[in-house]
Image (tube, grey):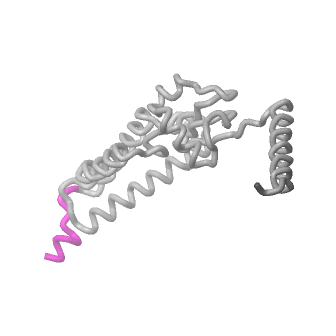
């Protein structure tokens, strides 16, 4: 029994390498085609798809070989393939852009870029939730938001103009003055 689990290879090592490389490349292309959202903005449906995808493709990688050796070899080929692709993407930026895509503006100059939201299948509610996670109370505080190649959304806070700053300072001073006056007034 143990011999079968450890050494029972039903397919050749070359076939395992070819299968693993083919599945890896198919996944890289699939994730590129279907967008960055699957990487950084997972909703429960995306998570279910990714979990099922890994289970579905397991046999495509190692075939009918359920041995420990077969699984470890498949994992090793995946890790080596990933290291090669990462190095190529680093060394050749054009390959990196081809594989990863480019970041995309979701909010520009305080205005939501609806076409970018549609293109990336991001709802306004998801964008607002991402802004709240980054410490923004609302999208009107955002100067720009960018969907990065990693799938994360980065935000830049809107800097108020001089009039808005003066207005905020006056309101704060009036609130302070009102508070001081209320402490001086005799109780009723």
The residue positioned farthest toward the bottom in the image shown: 2
Identified at 63% across, 44% down, the residue is: 136
The spot of residue 22 in percent (x, y) is: 34, 43
Quarter location, residue 77: bottom left
The spot of residue 126 in percent (x, y) is: 48, 39
The residue positioned farthest toward the top in the image shown: 115
Q: Nearer the viewer, residue 34 or 23?
A: 34
Q: Nearer the viewer, residue 45 or 63?
A: 45
Quarter location, residue 112: top right
Residue 111 is one of the magenta-drawn residues: no
Quarter of the figure with the N terminus: bottom left
Q: Nearer the viewer, residue 164 or 125?
A: 164
Quarter of the figure with the C terminus: bottom right
Where does the magenta region start and end?
1-11
Q: Nearer the viewer, residue 67 or 174?
A: 174
The spot of residue 123 in percent (x, y) is: 46, 33
Identified at 52% across, 43% down, the residue is: 129
Quarter location, residue 70: bottom left
Identified at 60% across, 40% down, the residue is: 92
| Left or right: 185 in relation to 50 | right
| Left or right: 156 in relation to 113 | right
Report the label total: 0
The residue positioned farthest toward the left in the image shown: 1
Residue 7 is one of the magenta-drawn residues: yes
Q: Is residue 170 above or below residue 114?
A: below
The spot of residue 69 in percent (x, y) is: 28, 67
């Amino acid at each position: 029994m143990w011999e079968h689990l450890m050494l029972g290879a039903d397919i050749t090592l070359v076939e395992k390498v070819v299968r693993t490389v083919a599945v890896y490349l198919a996944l890289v292309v699939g994730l590129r085609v279907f967008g960055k959202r699957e990487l950084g903005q997972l909703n429960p449906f995306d998570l279910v798809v990714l979990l099922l995808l890994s289970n579905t493709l397991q046999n495509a990688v190692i075939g009918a070989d359920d041995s420990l050796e077969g699984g470890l070899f498949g994992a090793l080929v995946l890790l080596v393939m990933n290291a090669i692709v990462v190095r190529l993407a680093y060394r050749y930026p054009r390959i990196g852009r081809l594989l990863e895509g480019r970041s995309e503006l979701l909010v520009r100059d305080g205005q939501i870029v609806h076409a970018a939201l549609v293109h990336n299948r991001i709802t306004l509610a998801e964008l607002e939730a991402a802004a709240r996670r980054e410490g923004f109370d609302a999208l009107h505080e955002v100067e720009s938001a960018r969907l990065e190649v990693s799938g994360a959304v980065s935000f830049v806070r809107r800097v108020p103009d001089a009039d808005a700053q003066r207005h905020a300072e006056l309101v704060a001073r009036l609130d302070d003055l009102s508070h001081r006056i209320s402490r001086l007034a005799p109780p009723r």
